[in-house]
Amino acid sequence: MSRIAFRSKILHFNDDPAHTGAPGTIMAYDDGVLVVEDGRIAALGTPEEMADLTRHIKVQHVPDALIMPGFVDAHVHFPQVDMIASYGKHLLDWLDHYAFPAEIGLTRFPARARDTAAFFLDELLRNGTTSALVFATSHAHTVDALFNEALKRNLRLISGKVMMDVHAPDDLLDTAASSYAHSKALIKKWHGKGRLGYAVTPRFALTSTEEQLELAGRLLHEFPGVLLHTHLCENTDEIARATELFPKACDYLDVYKCAGLLTNRSVFAHGVHLSEDERTALASAKAALAHCPTSNLFLGSGLFDLAATQEAGITLGLGSDVGAGTSLSPFATMSEAYKVAQLRGHSLSPYDAFYLATLGGARALHIDRHVGNFIPGNEADFVVLDLAATPLLKRRLGHANTFEQMLFALMILADDRVVRQTWVAGKLAHDRDA
Ligand code: GUN
Ligand code: ZN
């Protein structure tokens, strides 16, 4: 048995603070001890409460630090790290000019797919992200590349082959039948291997025929453990095109619903322009949304209505959506989520933001039985954040009088420099100072 313990400020959530004020929802320790045993959370409490458990080991005391669960990126595209920050287009042109060419690039050169996957995962770890729901490309070898690299790093990660049989460059197109067959083979190969999971991944309504969407629905039916991952209501031109292509559907979400893709294991990126009916349908299906604020701002897609989403009771996580998103840092995502909410007349509290970036995302991805908070028995994915990482942050936090003020300044000011260490299943996976 291997037991390690850390003493510092500690934060995690047992539930969604936007929906319950019950005691124990927010667990914030000014001085706490986290005990990890054989890669899992063993216990958490005050130094006095943990005295017995830590009697025979050396507790690593990290003053000026905050320990919290590893972040969860609920929507990101690994092939697009190579074209992040590409200038001047809105969604549909941006896809044609930047996203599709980047994906074609990986498709032609398997070695580049492996290299990009390795770089992408190391970047996630450097930013404190320990779990993610990830788009690959429409070619199975890019999924293999990502899962192989994730397996090496023992990450709890979910991905899938993009299904896309129409309205995209030939090099990226599959067919309904081939996308079904290749997805099925990948599910059998990867789903449940190590800490990996599979998501059936039709890109979005615009690039799939009805037949392909229906076969995606069949996969969900045949493999009840896998997720559905796609885009929804991101951009007004996209929505107009979707309803044009699928005239029988009463709205964009209905395109997916008709194909059996609106389920309690579905994760939809964006949802910037949802109708009330669509929000109600998402909530009653217990489907999840990934809010991607840096992407929505960068592409000029619109301002996500966080308050309406929370009121509807929709499961919600945060996504970087790189390469349309402008940063892999969950702090950038939280900070922009705050500003988008401000423009919508709503204030995103720091507790809500850190919840969304951890347990909220884990719930959206159905991995909250394993990660997302510090319940004993959970896999020990956590970060050690350096509260004195920059002179400004150190100075500002010196003026923070409460835990909440400290968290808020952190979510606005922090970036990858703050991530001192990232631990994956109880093992050190990134050490900033190494
Ligand atoms: N909609 C369909 N594909 C994409 C993509 O790659 N990025 C974003 N942001 N939206 C999409
Ligand atoms: Zn996306």
Image (cartoon, helix red, strand yellow):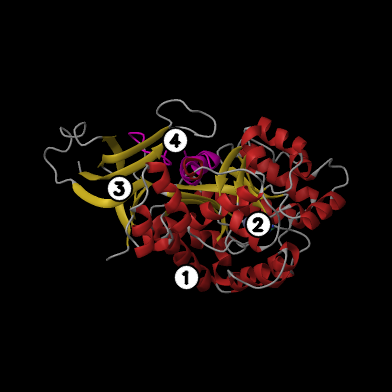
Taking the image as shown, residue 270 lies to the left or right of residue 10, namely right
Image quadrant of ligand 1 equals: bottom right
User: Who's the residue at 77% across and 35% down the image?
Assistant: 277
Q: Can residue 220 be seen in this view?
A: yes
Report the Cα–Cα distance between label 4 and label 3.
17 Å
Report the Cα–Cα distance between label 3 and label 2.
35 Å
Location of the N terminus (image quadrant) = top left
Ligand 1 within 8 Å, label 2 CB = no
- Percent coordinates x, y for residue 324 in the rendering: 62, 63
Residue marked by disc 3: 426
In which quarter of the view is residue 11 placed?
top left
First along the sequence among labels 4 and 3: 4
Q: Are marks 3 and 2 in contact (CB under 8 Å)?
A: no
Q: What secondary structure is marked by label 4?
A: loop
Q: Is residue 360 magenta?
A: yes
Residue marked by disc 1: 115
- Percent coordinates x, y for residue 5 in the rendering: 22, 44
Report the Cα–Cα distance between label 1 and label 3.
26 Å
Q: What secondary structure is marked by label 2?
A: helix
Q: Do the residues labelled 1 and 4 touch (CB within 8 Å)?
A: no
Residue marked by disc 4: 369
First along the sequence among labels 3 and 2: 2
Q: Which marked residue is nearer to the observer: mark 2 or mark 1? A: 2
